[in-house]
Image (tube, rainbow, N blue to C red):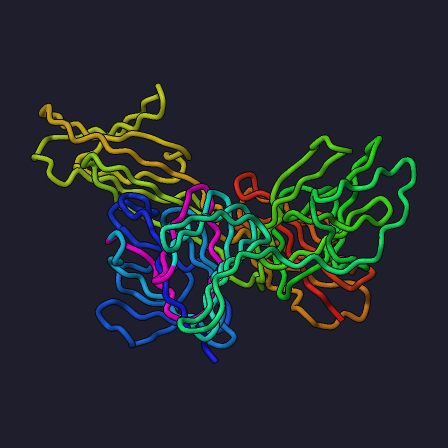
Amino acid sequence: MRRALALGLTLFVACAGKLCDDPYLAELSAQQGEVQRDEAGAVGKWARAEQGTRFRVGDGLRTGASGSAELALSSDGVALVESNTLLRFLDRDPREGDRRLAIEEGAVRIESGGVELDVHTPRAFARIKENSSVRIIANEGALRFDVLVGRVAIEQDGGTSELLAGQQRSLPAPGAPGAQQVTSEPKPAEPAPPEPAPSEPSQQPGQVERSEPAGTADLALPALESLTLHAPTLPLSARFAAPACAGNATLEVAGRLAERDGDTFITRLPAGSHSFRLRCDRRLVREGTLRARRDLATMELPKSAQELDLDADGRRYTVRYQNLLPVVTVRWPDARPAASYVLTLRRGKRERTFRATRPERKLLPGELSEGDQEFWFASASGQRSEVGTLRLEFDNTAHTLSLASPVEGSSASDGTAAVSGVALLRSSVSANDVPLTLDAKGRFSAQVPLREDRTVVVRAFHPAAGVHYYVRRLR
């Protein structure tokens, strides 16, 4: 049975997308199972949605019973769409008239990234703070906000309250008995703690909740660091080495104490983003974010550089790339005829010039660099175009690696597994601690020994994308 939910998400689209002259609201960055889209001019005519599909005002997206999708929002942030969900991008709402995303059915998790995002529903308004995550669900007309990471402010009937990670706000279906509720996740039952040893001071009461006993871990990882974990099924229990600490080392993940097991910590990681804080006694020694994504990691990475056109008309452009720097053609659309033209690129105090016989110039990947740069044309007759700005940045919401093998659940009889796939260029990749060599196109292939638990864990580090782990369980 599908669940009804209607709400809107403010998206800043004025020159905030990957291209200023293409004000799309979101881009499909990953998908699994049945994912379809329709367009504003043909609502209800559904077609298969492919990775890279862009959504503009009036377009829709829906997922089937086994489908899920990841949308990179043009403002900054990610919307993780669950199964049996229908989204539509609207051009206005009754409150402010801005463009927004309407979730007509289903459930979605929104990660705000580096900006605040505003979520509107017919019954409440929520402001998702920077680097926060909230799951919005509905069931037979009832609405609920579950705060997974960070802070969310909820406004209803003229009043505002702030929810922290682990808290929720429930709004019953219209006409149903009971008022709205703000609750924290229930604390699991646990036996009375033993008397602490002199060298292990007990946890101060009321500071953080203890997690449920983790037992054995599904995955053993080295040093605790900010990372993204990709696995076909979640949650997973992850084991991290505890650092040397003269006092009592503690690890909090999403506001809960991780289980201590000798010289390691074990924590349960459901899908989502989970902030962590590592302390030695009361001193904070490390903090970061553990992200877990339900992901088969079978999406193909771009095999060639994207090609883009920019106009030297004074506008600001933002271009995000995934694997290869783009090929950018800069044009001066209203230039007068002249014998020759010069395109100037300026980054900081450094200027580079490119001569052309026409008021356009194709810039190859080696001629562009990441960051902000200004550009303009000048003609031999003395004319000069408007000065535009190009920001070129790596797309850290995109996939960093795709795995062709091994397949989840496949058999391996000789204690080894064939590992192959493609990673972003400039990545360092290993499988079960065996370094893998990438060819000129980022491809890798090797036979590696299985771990005792018959898993393959691929680690990929990219200077811009950070650390990612990909898990496969074999039998």
Question: How many numbered dots are placed on residues in this image?
Answer: 0
Q: Residue at coordinates 32% horizontally, 60% vertically from top-left?
A: 55
Residue situated furthest bottom in the rendering: 1
Q: Quadrant of the C terminus?
A: bottom right
Residue at (50, 58) in percent of width and height: 169
Name the spot of residue 60 as percent of width and height, x first.
33, 67
Q: Is residue 44 visible?
A: yes
Report x, y in % for residue 163. Answer: 52, 49
User: Is 289 placed left or right of 267 in the picture?
Assistant: left
Residue 42: give x, y in percent of width and height: 24, 73
Among the 4 quarters of the image, the one containing residue 342 = top left
Residue 34 seen in render:
no
Magenta part of the chain: 97-123
- Judge by depth and name the residue closer to the eye, 245 or 308: 245
Figure quadrant of residue 336: top left
Image position of 137 with respect to 305: above or below: below
Q: Residue at x 38, y 54 (%)?
A: 125
Q: Is residue 406 magenta?
A: no
**Residue 354: x percent and y percent?**
27, 30
Judge whether 238 appears above or below 375 on screen.
below
The quadrant where residue 250 appears: top right
Task: Please tell me which residue lies in front, 416 or 190.
Answer: 190
Q: Nearer the viewer, residue 98 or 400?
A: 98
Q: Which residue occupies the extreme top position in the image?
A: 349
Is residue 98 located in the magenta-colored stretch of the structure? yes
